[in-house]
Image: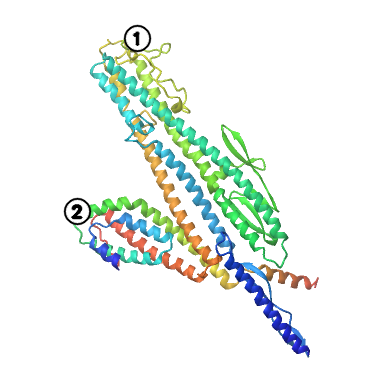
Amino acid sequence: MRAMRELGARQEHPELKELVMEASHALALLDSERLEELALSCQALNRDLAPLSAEVKEELVRQAREAARDMAVFARVLAATRANLKVMERLRQMHASGLEYSERQVRGWAEMESGHGND
Amino acid sequence: MGTINSALSLMNGALDADQSALSVVANNVANANTTGYTEETPNWQENQPIEVNGISIGSGVSETGATSQRDKVLEQRLDQQQQLASASGVRLTALNNIQALFTPDSGSSSSTAGDIGSDITSFFDSFSSLEADPTDNSLRQNVLSTASTLAGDISSAAASLNSQRTALDQEATGVASQVNSLTRAIAQLDLQIQSASADADAGTLEDQRQQDLSQLSQLIGINQVTTENNGLSITTTSGQLLVSEGSNQQLTTGTVNGVTDFFLGGTDVTSQLATGGGQLGGYLTARDQDIPKALSSLDQLAYSISTAVNKQNNTGTDLNSVTGSVANPLYIFNDPGQVAGSAAAMTVTMTDPNQIAAAGAGDGAGDNSNAVDLFNLGSGTIVNGQSPINSYSNFVSTLGSTVSEVQSENTAQNASVTQLQTQNNAFSSVNLNDEAAAMSKLETSYQAASQVFTMLNTIMASALNLGMQTTVS
């Protein structure tokens, strides 16, 4: 909340580039608390954009252009996280449904099968 | 009595099992700080039930060894991301070195490759100065001097690029040697793991193999296939066999067109390795794509400037009233002959400033019409439809974009590796965090980051479209 208030206080000069870079960094480290804090800050920033003067908007345009590359990085990190999440979800499903059989289990079944002979 | 003995045996078995399990736990604690060590959990096996008067009575459990808590899917995903991150990291370093070459050094008094842009301007501007007084010797000297600086900077840039290419070639060869050592070690470990007792978990050996695989993944793009008895087949990402059946295929090298090519089983796999990932992929991409691309742009620039300027000077008349001809050409630069190699060979061959043909053909020494034409070449579309300065600017700008793109890739890939390491540590290392907590952290972070991304995207889109509504519902 403190970070949000600080951002609100300097809303006329939002450091978009820093914000985007910090989001990428927090996502890389899976810092969910910081990301949630950033989400609130962005929400506040976004809400307060409408009444800005033309001069401040011009400044915002410059900052948005500067932050464009970092936004592309953030998008890539987000895409990589989504892929990692899918891998982890698949793993969890495999573990939950017991699809991943242990070698001992497999050996046990093989022994059972061999015990049946040619019947 | 049979019942009491059975009960005692059952209790005894349970105590033995507990003791074995304690040994496994002790082993985990002892290895908590060992790199690559994977936590082991005791395996419990139900003993055969005892039949008493036709009634089956359970006979407890035995501890049958330990199983490492590793997950191959996660480890392979981690290895895969490491391959990509290593490749882009190595390529990024090489690209940064190339870019540094073309960055003006404001603190340097001597001209360098970074000054090529201003060299081009100075060279063509020198003809503009000469227009004012075509007979002035110092102005003529200035033309040769600026030509010499331009040629020197272009040829030194080409030489530096060739040196960087040689260095990358050596690095790639060194990586191939490391790959061979690792695949040999993995093949030997495979044999040991496969020959381990069927009931035993070759935990330590598997940890060691996993560590070797992680290292191998950083060096070269690989695919892994688990075979019988927990063996492993390893191929390159394009499918060439590296390890199989406890033996490894050596990566050999040979010189082809002045650079080192890489062979597996007699097949040249250099281009496949370049796109496969790992450090080797990064080195080969920089060596075979990025540097040749930069050299090609420089060659084209050098060739176009040299041929256009030589041709134009040869159409005029110099201060000695000599008009250029095929037999007696008035060339300022060496004649490149072909595009390839033009940059490295670029030099000023004219030594007499009087040979600068400022006058039009057959005109008097005071005429400046050819100097005007020579100056106009600076803004003419002589380099593949572009002016020399625009062509050079585009080259530098394209290089910058490539660096930026690879930087983005590398940052994202490293972030992905960091995330996966966190997951892998929680899952397979001696760690108090459990799998569920790690998974929850990943999910929450992704959801929060998605929100941040959506809002930032809206803010940026709104900012870049001034006056648009920006509020998020």
Q: Is residue B57 above or below residue A85?
A: below
Q: Nearer the viewer, residue A63 or B169?
A: B169
Q: Residue at x 52, y 42 (%)?
A: B283
Q: Nearer the viewer, residue B240 or B190?
A: B190
What is the quadrant of the N terminus of chain B in the image?
A: bottom right
In the visual, does B154 lie left or right of A98?
left
Q: Is residue B376 above or below residue B9?
A: above
**Helix, strand or loop at mark 1:** loop
Picture coordinates of residue B176, whole percent (x, y): 59, 43
Where is mark 2, residue-wise?
A: A55
Observer-side mark, 2 or 1, equals: 2
What is the quadrant of the C terminus of chain B in the image?
A: bottom left
Q: Badge 1 local density, few (<14 within 10 Å), some, or many (20+)? A: many
Q: Is residue B405 above or below residue A85?
A: above
Picture coordinates of residue B408, whole percent (x, y): 42, 50
Q: Badge 2 local density, few (<14 within 10 Å), some, or many (20+)? A: few
In the visual, does B62 lie left or right of B215?
right
Q: Residue furthest top?
A: B321
Q: Residue at x 38, y 67 (%)?
A: A33
Q: Is residue A33 above or below residue B90?
A: below
Determine the chain carrying the residue at label 2.
A
Amino acid type, residue under disc 1 in the picture: Val
Amino acid type, residue under disc 2 in the picture: Glu
Query: Taking the image as drawn, is residue A99 in sight?
Result: no
**Helix, strand or loop at mark 2:** helix
Picture coordinates of residue B139, whole percent (x, y): 27, 18
Where is mark 1, residue-wise?
A: B322
Q: Quadrant of residue B384?
A: top left
Picture coordinates of residue B190, whole percent (x, y): 68, 56
Tag of residue B188: none
Q: Mark 1 and mark 2 in contact (Cβ < 8 Å)?
A: no
